[in-house]
Image: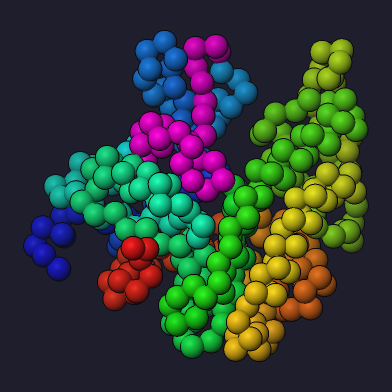
Amino acid sequence: MSFFSSFATDMAIDLGTANTCVFARGRGIVLNEPSIVAFNTITGEVEAVGLEAYEMLGRTPPHLRAVRPMKDGVIADFDAAEKMLAHFVRKATGRRPLVRPRLVIGVPPEITPVERRAVKDSGYRAKASEVHLVDEPMAAAIGSGLPVSDPTGNMIVDIGGGTTDIAVISMAGTVYGRSLRVAGDAMNEAIANYLKRACNLLIGERTAEQIKFELGSAAPLAQPLSMEVKGRHATQGVPRTVVICDQQVREALADPLRQIVQAVMDSLERIPPELCVDIYDRGMVLTGGGAMLRNLDRRLAQETGLPVLVAENPLTSVVQGVGMILSDLPLLRKVALA
């Protein structure tokens, strides 16, 4: 380690569609905020980033626009992503670093070369000295404590905001990887569409997410749940309140959940035969915010016949794993994307 590196704040970043987490070497997770930027359309300046911008969703005047720079796990708005990343890097350091930091960023496994370049360019524009990219499922597996360097199969299913990433890992390499662009955001959209169709109720993104957290499940619950939902009548245009139950939310989530389950089943069919025994013995691990959906582990276990475990800290598994990679140079050389 050079003398100057002690003045830098090397960081590991999970640049997610819904949330961005930052891990600083020696300090752990220092930031976990929504991946949102609010712009002033008159001046072109950034008004708010992260949690402050999230509070503005659906409530901004015409001259303020809250945008999500990430879509389906990759950069959709390059300018907004650059400003968001620079803001989070500054906020995570808490000071102006004497030496430019080294960044390790988690990305989906099926990211294209163009999308990969966009992420790296955003890192360099955020004043990084080096930018390394690693597969999010690999990072999630490391962060979940799986023995990824052993010559055995480890299956990980990372259900984030924009993508569901499925991977089988052995000897610090991804033997099979797939990224399905159906995850938490698709569930929120499905809930909003269901209420519009079934109840003539229009709701915003934040309300749909709240319904998912409070009532969402992948299989019937032992105790029925219900809640009041406030929104706007779709045809009359007046405020309206309806009461919905967990059964209705399960019905709303049926299609995105079916796609996720089918993607897992398809992945199992493509696993090399030599690793099948390991997967059937050890099962799979769920990470990401979607892993917290009630009874999702039970549903996947019923559909696949495999043991299914939810990671201890599913929301932070990826950034914890990227942080461990950041602190282990030999491991970084093995798993960093070319």
What is the x, y in percent for residue 142? 47, 72
Q: Quadrant of the N terminus?
A: bottom left
- Count of labels shown? 0
**What span is colored magenta in the figure?**
61-85
281 left or right of 132?
right
- Image point 63% across, 55% down: which residue? 180
What is the x, y in percent for residue 264? 70, 66
Q: Give whichever of 300, 263 is nearer the camera.
A: 263
What is the basis of the colouring in this image?
rainbow
Residue 202 versus residue 170 in the image, above or below = above
Could you tell me if residue 320 is visible in this image? no
- Image point 77% across, 74% down: which residue? 304
Could you tell me if residue 195 is visible in this image? yes
Residue 315 versus residue 97 in the image, above or below = below
Residue 108 versus residue 226 in the image, above or below = below
- Image point 50% across, 17% down: which residue? 64
What is the x, y in percent for residue 330? 29, 76
Is residue 310 inside the magenta stretch? no
Q: Quadrant of residue 171?
A: bottom left
Q: Quadrant of residue 41?
A: top left
Q: Give whichever of 55, 181 is nearer the camera.
A: 181
Outermost left residue: 3
What is the x, y in percent for residue 172? 43, 77
Q: Quadrant of the C terminus?
A: bottom left
228 left or right of 210?
right
- Image point 30% across, 62% down: which residue? 26
Is residue 78 inside the magenta stretch? yes
